[in-house]
Amino acid sequence: MFGSLILLVFLAVLGIWKSVPVGFLLDVNPYLVCLMTIIGGSAGVIAVYFIGSKIRIFLNKWMSNKNLNKRESRVSGFVERYGIPGLGLFSTLVMGPGLTMALGLAVVKNHTKLLAWVLTGVVVWSVVLTFIGQVGLSIL
């Protein structure tokens, strides 16, 4: 049981979509699946936040080498259209929390606000995906 919980935390660092289904496959309690997914996703986001300056430098060099400016970047276009809350909530589900935080650090100026919204996205989507998984299993 303990090994399954640790596995869920590590998978959640990589992405919420990986952790929740594996938790149900391992027959872990849905509350623990949700909690471990939140812990792992949050740990990954916080780690990226604290090493963010190095990531930001790398991404800015990479984007300049690819001849992309901020307006042409999909991430910055998304931020311009939906703001930091949209990036934090939507991209956390689609791209994963760590990648969302890394790309957001390169584009967004207010990093603490980005951190808060990405962590909110981790909690919201962990709860929603766990609920959907539990309802789906109860129907079967």
Image (cartoon, rainbow, N blue to C red):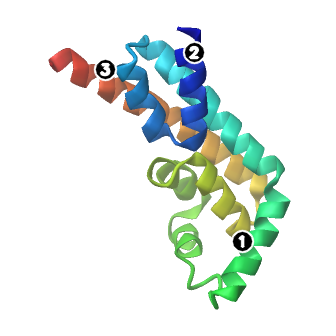
Label 2: which residue? 3
Residue at the (77%, 70%) spot, across then down: 58
Q: Is residue 102 above or below residue 36?
A: below
The residues tagged by marks 1 and 3 sit, at their Cα atoms, a distance apart of: 38 Å
Q: Are marks 1 and 3 in contact (CB under 8 Å)?
A: no
Give the label on residue 140, or none: none
From the image, tell me which residue sits under label 1: 59
Q: Quadrant of residue 35?
A: top right
Disc 1 and disc 2 in contact, CB within 8 angstroms:
no
Residue type pointed to by label 1: Leu
Q: Residue at x 38, y 30 (%)?
A: 21
| Rendering coords of residue 135 (x, y %) | 26, 21
* N-term-proximal mark, 1 vs 2: 2
Residue that numbered label 3 is attached to: 134
Residue 77 coordinates in the image, percent (x, y): 54, 75
Q: Give the number of the mark in front: 1 or 2.
A: 2
Whole-angstrom CA distance, mark 1 to mark 2, is 35 Å
Circle 1 SS class: helix
Mark 1 vs mark 3: which is more N-terminal?
A: 1
Q: Is residue 8 left or right of residue 49?
A: left
- Residue at (62% x, 46% y) in the render: 117
Q: Please report whichever mark, 2 or 3, sits nearer to the chain's N-terminal start.
A: 2
Tell me the kind of residue under disc 2: Gly
Instruction: Determine whether, in the image, residue 67 is placed left or right of residue 37.
Output: right
Type of the residue with mark 3: Gln
Residue 44, quarter of picture? top right
Residue at the limit of the structure toward the bottom, as seen here = 67
The x and y percentages for residue 1 are: 52, 8
User: Where residue 14 sits in the image (x, y, percent)?
Assistant: 57, 43
Instruction: Bin the neighbour count of mark 2 within 10 Å (Cα to Cα): few under 14, some 14-19, many 20 and up.
Output: few
Which residue is most to the front?
3
Which residue is located at x 62 percent, y 87 percent? 68
